[in-house]
Amino acid sequence: MKAVVFHAIGDIRLEDVPDPQLQEDTDAIVRLQVSAICGTDLHFIRGTMEGVAPGTILGHEGVGVVEQVGAGVRNLQVGDRVVIPSTVACGYCSYCRAGYYAQCDNANPHGKSAGTAFYGGPQQAGGFHGLQAEKARIPYAHVNLVKLPPEINDDQAIMLSDIFPTGYFGADLADIAPGRTVAVFGCGPVGQFAIASAKLMHAGRIFAVDAVPDRLAMARAQGAETVDFNAEDPVETIKHLTGGIGVDRAIDAVGVDAVHPHHGPAADPQQNAAMEAQSRELAPHAHPDGANWVPGDAPSQALNWAVQALAKAGTLSIIGVYPPTDNAFPIGLAMNKNLTVRMGNCNHRKYIPMLIELVQSGRIDPARILTKREPLTSVLEAYKAFDTRQPGWMKVELAPVA
């Protein structure tokens, strides 16, 4: 079968690889109808999160049809159309039972303290082959596959695999209540769903901070008040727009590949130089290819702005991805403002059934975030366009099957 294979930082290829096989009686094999490219995939290729083994199939978003089921899978059958939650969980440990699927005791083969297991990621995340392929093996299939109703099409369903649950998780962590004022830092796909989720929770005002024009335009179309950090200081602007108070809630939807302002009032040469040094420290093996695979030049930029823009006693939600080696956080300022900080990898399996119902009801159409549909044969070109934030390349769906 065809699959996107990681070879090294800065080196991915579309290759022929063996079809996956059932390994445990709780496995299933799914033929992918659609997969997608995510910003997390870029962390691996840019080198801002290391540890992906050469030969690993990338991708952690997928929708498909069940082709085989192990003898221990009692709730699925061949032919079922399913969405695949991005994180892998057993469904029966105490963490899964409490809804903390991303901290499952059993899914990660490195042990109970190893952390989140997910597809197409580093060895420390389990080393599972990913979903940018024609087929995939799904462990613990009884919990890691969710049946889809016929009313939900593939374009909608692929958004339910990762980015919609993650955006909703971010808004949930932020404890958004009706009337709350919210700032979302980063208007990529996850940031867009954080905005959409804040609206579903009846936030009073939503500020959206980014510098990419089409991302700001999509945020504005959703009703968010947009702030271009290359044109104005985002902290000062948010403070001004909130009567000097700041926002009640902030969501970091960027992560380690954040960038600093390159011009405008927020561009501080000394601070930018310090951020760039931090980037080099976190990604020592980066291997750019021209404009592609360049690590973000300000790993803690979104965190710093979010802490500064929050009102006293506000809440910071962190859903942007950071590697275990990152230890930069403005702890002093956060502590002295009595901030609450909540963060982590999304517990996808907790949210997907509820989000399916929201889509079925017509309250939201997640396919509105999807901007490109590309065949798997064009995946390398699609990756490069998405990596450099080309206009129109907000969210890319891949079609493994012609």
Image (cartoon, rainbow, N blue to C red):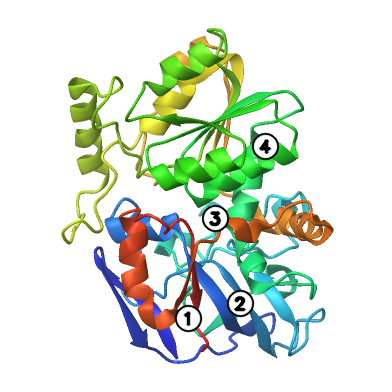
In three-dimensional space, the C-alpha distance between marks 4 and 2, rounded to whole angstroms, equals 32 Å
Q: Nearer the viewer, mark 3 or mark 2?
A: 2
Residue 27 image offset from top left, x and y in percent: 65, 81
**Between discs 3 and 4, the one toward the N terminus:** 3
Q: Earlier in the sequence, mark 3 or mark 2?
A: 3
Label placed on residue 198: 4
Could you tell me how far apart the alpha carbons at marks 1 and 4 are, in whole angstroms?
33 Å
Q: Could one spot residue 162 in this view of the protein? A: yes
Viewer-side residue, 185 vs 93: 185
Q: Give the SS element for disc 1.
A: loop
- For the residues bearing labels 3 and 4, Cβ distance under 8 angstroms: no
The residue under label 1 is: 133
Q: Earlier in the sequence, mark 4 or mark 2?
A: 2
Q: Which mark is residue 116?
A: 3
Image coordinates for residue 132, horizontal then vertical, percent: 47, 75
Q: Amino acid at mark 2?
A: Ile
Q: Earlier in the sequence, mark 3 or mark 1?
A: 3
- Where residue 360 appears, x then y in whole percent? 81, 62
Residue 112 drawn above or below residue 237 = below
For discs 1 and 4, the disc positioned in front in the rendered view: 4
